[in-house]
Image (cartoon, rainbow, N blue to C red):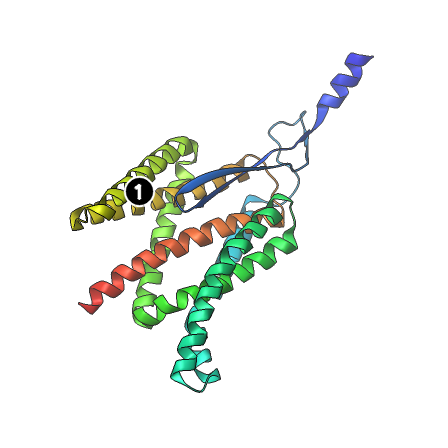
Amino acid sequence: STRVRSSAASDVYKRQLVCYTYFNGGIIMEIYQKHNQTIDTNKPNSRIVGKSKTAIWTQIFLWFGLGVLLSGIVGFVFPWALSYMVSTVEMFETVYLYSIIGSAIVLFPIMIVFQVGAMKNKSILTAVCYVIYAIAFGILLSSSLYYAGAENSLYALLITGGVMAILGVAGILLKDKLGTIAIISISLATSALLISLVNFFFFNETIYWISSIAMMVCVLLIVAFDFGSISRSIDANIDMGNALIIYNAFKLYTDFLYIFVRILAIVASSRRK
């Protein structure tokens, strides 16, 4: 009778592991969350009842687009709106400076709360933190957008979009080689940091460009890694809830902004010469 009960129980079991992959500041972190899903073992190739792959990707890109849109609008509008709200240049500079500092301070705790919300599958908390983060980063980004100008920002946006599209396709195609991508990324990041440390004491422009290129290549590989890890999660029959969808959108959002800021600096510098 024990074997009968055991056999019956094995027909329907609980899978409780969901793997999140997050990149921040050159560090790859694996975060694991317990997430109950019921799978019929009599149909091992059947997909868990839930959202389709297309629906999941669509929601991820919609949240990703919302974050980029919020940051972009705030980045362009905030300095202009602030200039109409204050009466003097001195007051504008003071308020703007404190706004930049405040937004930079807010980003870290909001990101921690966002991580906790995603791990506990709290979709509302995750969504609120995501929106606040995008707005705060938009304020932080406003100085770069103001310096570069609308035209250079548009060029950087188009280039970044093209780079993200290429890396997305590459990441999905190479999703079975994520371990190799991760090893190469970590190696490049470590090398770039060591080179930068040496260059801090013995500055050399050539070394500076080598370390910058190495770090940029590392980031591009991480973007491909993120796309691949999301694709593997979807293919592995993981039925994503809203919190996990927003979390994956946040990964792509941070990837996009890092590339955008770097490209914006290059475009603005080259066009001013």
Which one is nearer the viewer's eye here, 61 or 90?
A: 90
Residue at image mark 1: 193
Find residue 68 and report its horizontal and vertical position in percent: 46, 61
What residue is at 65 percent from the left and 38 percent from the top?
35
Give the mark count: 1
Image coordinates of residue 187 in percent, x first then y, are 32, 35
**Hey, which quadrant is residue 172 in on the image?**
top left
x and y, in percent, of residue 97 in the image: 42, 71
Farthest residue to the bottom: give it. 87
The answer to whether 16 is drawn above or below residue 239 in the figure is above
Q: Is residue 183 above or below residue 251?
A: above
Query: Is any atom of residue 73 visible in this view?
Result: no
Q: Residue furthest right?
A: 1
Choose between 50 and 267: the one closer to the eye.
Answer: 267
**What residue type is disc 1 on?**
Leu
Quarter of the image with the N terminus in it? top right
Residue 172 lies left or right of residue 215; in this view the side is: right
Where the C terminus falls, by quadrant? bottom left
Residue in the image at 65% along x and 50% along y = 122
Q: Residue at x 29, y 38 (%)?
A: 191
Provide residue 249's location: percent of width, then percent of height: 51, 51
Q: Describe residue 36's horizontal placement relative to residue 55 as left or right.
A: right
The residue that appears at 35% across and 54% down in the rendered structure is 259
Query: Can the viewer see residue 165?
Result: yes
Q: Is residue 124 left or right of residue 200?
A: right
* Residue 183, quarter of the rendered image: top left
Viewer-side residue, 229 vs 31: 31
Q: Secondary structure at mark 1?
A: helix
